[in-house]
Amino acid sequence: MNLHHARRAFTGILLRELLRFFGQRERLLAALVRPLIWLFVFAAGFRTILGVSIQPPYETYVLYEVYIAPGLCGMILLFSTMQGALAMVYDQEMGSMRVLLVSPLPRWYLLACKLVAIVLVACLQVYVFLGIARFWDVDPPLWGYLAALPAFFAAGLMLGALGLLLSSLIQQLESFAGVMNFVIFPMFFASSALYPLWRMRESSELLYQICAFNPFTHAVELVRFALYLQVAWSELAWTLGWTTLFLATALWGYSPVKGFLARTGKGE
Amino acid sequence: MSERPPALRVEGVSFAYTKCIKALDRVSFTVPQASFTGLLGPNGAGKTTLMALVTRLFSGTGAIEVAGRDLARDPCAALATMGVVFQRPTLDLDLTVERNLRYAAALYGLAGREAETRISAVLERLGVADRRRAPVRTLSGGLRRRVELARALLHGPSLLILDEPTVGLDIDSRRALVEHVHALCREGSLAALWTTHLVDELAAEDRVVVLDRGRVVAEGTVGEVVRAAGASSLAQAYHRLTGRQMVAE
């Protein structure tokens, strides 16, 4: 693989992703309004009911807004990468995914470029959200914003790899509504994004186990600790493990020899 | 001096979506350099599957070589010499013509002044230079097709694959596209493989491959295929070979 060629292709793919994102203002607005409503309305309403005791990485009692902020960052990454996957299903239906797949570069590289571009656009949205949230008492240490970047990226990569996998499985755009119901919402609610897991354990051990297994929980905790300048090693290992699994299956799904494209005739 | 390899060589290619039904069965044909080859066949004959194999969206059994480069063993080199116009429109409607072409240029490793020069040249050549900064959404179907052809030609391929490129075009746009690709082939640097249902898209000097139920039932120049079928026209030959009527304009 020629390095100049590879670099130019990545730049082209990233630029297209950015142009498409900023070209659709309602998408940018939706990406921000959703977590901000949770922060301004939901958190304000529930702060008295859902008290959070001292737990790492926080050194003191924190407001509920502060607790759910990393979960909302995760929410942005989740929705944005799934939307990226949705665009890939749309691209497959419309055919523009084929333009990418017939370019003279290894297929794994092209899909990796696409994935990284989707994740970087998602990270950008997270920073805009955190910028606004700072005026709402969500004020992690300034260095935390920088330290969290690799965590945002790793979490985004894991969720994006899952999206990529789903996009290779889904045959029609209509099926994507099912993904919202069966993947995004369960992942978000059955996680530590909105409530600490020990609270979940108080009500149901089974639910607690499900939440603890949920890849999204690991991603959110990784982000939570990173924002407060700590590394959650086991969460990092889980996140990378899930990423590898999702990515390997997604690449298999897009492989011209064995993949779902050939098996289902989606490439037609 | 050694002879140049054909622009495309398809040898014993088979493909099945399920174990019982073969979409393609030992398909073999060649597209010589600088030729216009029409791939004819009724719906369900396997044309689009063959196109997906030639562009490596799928892999089947058998061998496919593009300008002497094996598609399975050296896919990047083979794909680099190929330009593709897909059956369905594949342009980004919200981006401008130029942005669409810049994206394609980047995928083929072209950037900066080189990309700029090539984009200007292909747009000029296809008569869409004045719409360069227009969003694709604002273009007519015929113009969009021309932009897709411009995109496929951007990196100077030696083989152009066109999968029913005239679907949905009005008569004038269709004729213009057919003539343009014929002119490119006559210039000598490009070969085209063009799938169609329409008899009037092929000229007397063109080559033709007739596909029916996943098999090649005839191959040669239009004259050769007509003579071999004992017919008086290509439409009649097609009818005899496939049992279907060919669509005229």
Image (cartoon, coloured by chain):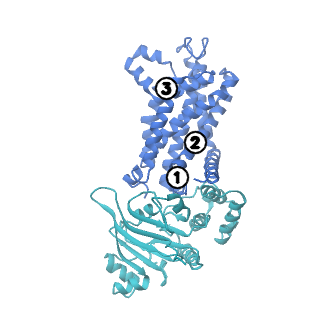
Mark 3 to mark 1: distance in Å? 33 Å
Of callouts 2 and 1, which one flags the residue occurring earlier in the amino acid sequence? Answer: 1
Q: Is residue B16 above or below residue B4?
A: above
Q: Is residue B79 left or right of residue B121?
A: left
Q: Which chain contains the residue that carries disc 3?
A: A
Of callouts 3 and 1, which one flags the residue occurring earlier in the amino acid sequence? Answer: 1
Toward which corner of the image does residue B141 lie, by quadrant?
bottom right
Numbered tag placed on residue A116 in the rendering: 2
- Quadrant the N terminus of chain B occupies: bottom right
Q: Secondary structure at mark 2?
A: helix
Q: Nearer the viewer, mark 3 or mark 1?
A: 1
Residue A3, horizontal then vertical, whole percent: 62, 51
Of all chains in the rendering, the one displayed in cyan is: B
**Are the residues under marks 3 and 1 on the same chain?**
yes
Residue B20, horizontal then vertical, whole percent: 27, 58
Q: Confirm or deny contact between disc 3 and disc 1 (CB under 8 A).
A: no
From the image, tell me which residue sits under label 1: A106
Residue at left offset 57%, top offset 32%: A34
Q: Secondary structure at mark 3?
A: helix
What amino acid is at disc 1?
Pro
What amino acid is at disc 3?
Thr
**Can residue A166 be seen by looking at this rendering?**
no
From the image, tell me which residue sits under label 3: A217
- Of B236 and B50, the residue lying toward us: B50
- Of B12 and A66, the residue lying toward us: B12
- Of B49 and A113, the residue lying toward us: A113
* Label 3 Cα crowd, 10 Å radius (few <14 / some 14-19 / many 20+): many
Of callouts 3 and 2, which one flags the residue occurring earlier in the amino acid sequence? Answer: 2
Instruction: Report which colour depicts chain A.
Output: blue
What amino acid is at disc 2?
Val
Mark 3 to mark 2: distance in Å? 21 Å
Residue at left offset 44%, top offset 50%: A255
